[in-house]
Amino acid sequence: MNSLVILVFAVAVLLCGYTFYGKWLAKKWGVDPKAPTPAVVHNDGEDYVPSSRLTVFTHQFSSIAGAGPVQGPILAAVFGWVPVLVWLLVGGVFFGAVQDFGALFASVKNDGKSIGLVIEQYIGKMGRKFFTLFCWLFSCLVIAAFTSMTSSTFNGYVTAADGTVTQNFNGAAAATISFLFVGFACVFGLMQKALGKKMTERWKFVTAIVFIALMFALGMKLPVYLTASQWNLVLMVYLFAAAVVPMWILMQPRDYMTTFMLLGMILGGVIGVVVGHPEMKLNAFNGFVLTSSTGSKSYMFPTLFVTIACGAVSGFHSLVSSGTSSKTISNEKDMLPVGYGAMLTETLLGVISLIVVGAVAVNGTVPSGLTPFQIFSAGVAGFMEQLGVPETFANVFMTMCISALALSTLDSVGRIGRLSFQELFMDEDEEQPAWKKFLTNRYVATVCTLVLGYALCLGGYQNVWALFGAANQMLAALVLLGIAVFLKATRRENKMVLVPMVIMLAVTFTAIILNVVNNVQAYMNGTAVFLVNGLQLILAVFLIILAVVVVVTCMKTLLKPKQQDEMRKQTA
């Protein structure tokens, strides 16, 4: 199959999904451009900051477009390119974008509250606390996975099979560029704050492009060589700062610049496919059950659906939608492009990842001995070289893009984890005792979140990814359930979220139970390591218990007959 045909088909499906299904949802749920948004009503200059549509879109997209849409499709390609493509497109249009848009809509209609606080009034305070605890633990898993992933990308040293250690220029240069991003982002944020409306979108765009060019020029001249372990500690310090400083000074300007770089990467991939239109060398379908060289079996259900999260449906996205983006929306009409549109853009990135691995496949299978990031970076860099881009620049650019994908997710989840921890101990209708005031302090909450995240990351992202994927999709199922409860309570149609909710509950309970079984078997075989299997086993069992409690609580409300439903109607 020619990859250009696949790309054109995918773009057509995504455009139709946005134009028809997305706009239908906005009309059905009642998006009101005249209604004041939480960002306008509660503007505090820190978390609640009214922002332009483009600024909020760039924050949403760069936060959700982590390493998932690159890693997931490439790992799942062992089943064949057809099931991967089908799940990306169906999941993106009918599952993921609906969840992202629904979480954003529910939050904006409820004073910018997180999805947990939104559904509290319908499932009770205890149900909300269980849901929030699940969100916080999941945030720690994300911090662990993406910290390990980013530090591995930044690693300035490579150890060969014979033990020889050499310097890794691409990783060291990408690290320098990444932290120059932080410095330039702060300057960019201060410029916007000082100039206000005088800094138009055109000048913001020009400034961002100039800063990006400067960062690449300086970063390639001044590589910083540190080990992955050292980068883990540096990233923790960065995450602490990103979680507590005002949105306008770091996250928003950094996400704004990052998005243009990521869109440039996507554009480079698209142009490369159009110009080169390589053939898909992957098999179309390899079967529902795969057997490895060691004899272990991998089943398409649920493996495919938890391996491909970002790009199809990801629970983490809902935390961004209701945790940060909802507090910066200045007009409700911006919710569709931000919530629904950003998700479909990420789906396109997932499709490009599939095409890249399809173009470099060997004997119909994914190349062995290479990580998904190495496959993607080399593939897109190859596309860019066909367009005349120098090889060294193309490789550093792609390494930087991969690290930017992970780093932009990291600073968002650090803040979301801090907010979730604070919400866990916060009771709006009660006087806070001293110990709760201590735990809800933004600095204390951030430290507690990062300590657990750091402990989990010591086992390496490869060992965290399986549980992260299952927990991520479990969160998506719970959020869809919460959105269904909110829509029912506010007399809005919720049928469009019920089918995705049921499917995701089936997928994720199966996947997370299998994770428990695998970790128990590791202990029975005597091969278990506590930092890997022990922590995962404890977390997995705890997540199952929390999920069951939340599902039962929400289903009681969802299945309550209408004549007994005394929940107040939201007029917002």
Image: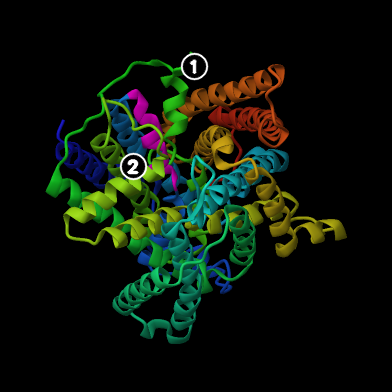
Q: Please give left or right for residue 327 compared with residue 7 in the image.
A: right
Q: Position of residue 153 (x, y in %)?
A: 48, 52
Say which of 114 and 1 sits in front. 1
- Note whether 105 is above or below 333 in the view shown: above
Reply yes or no: does residue 261 show up in magenta. Answer: no
Q: Position of residue 528 (x, y in %)?
A: 69, 26
Main SS, magenta region, reads helix
Q: Position of residue 360 (x, y in %)?
A: 26, 37
- Note whether 308 is above or below 156 in the view shown: above
Q: Earlier in the sequence, mark 2 or mark 1?
A: 1
Q: Position of residue 458 (x, y in %)?
A: 65, 45
Q: Is residue 487 visible?
A: yes
User: In the rendered structure, which amino acid carries the disc numbered 2?
Assistant: Gly
Question: Residue at point 23% right, 37% down?
Answer: 359
Name the element at disc 1.
loop
Reply yes or no: does residue 71 show up in magenta. Answer: yes
Say which of 122 and 193 sits in front. 193
Determine crowd level at label 1: few under 14, some 14-19, many 20+ residues with C-alpha closer than 10 A.
few
Residue 294, numbered label: 1
Q: Please give left or right for residue 478 compared with residue 493 in the image.
A: right
- Note whether 307 is above or below 197 in the view shown: above
Residue 350, numbered label: 2
User: In the rendered structure, which amino acid carries the disc numbered 1?
Assistant: Thr
In the image, which residues are magenta? 67-79
* C-alpha distance separating marks 2 and 1: 29 Å
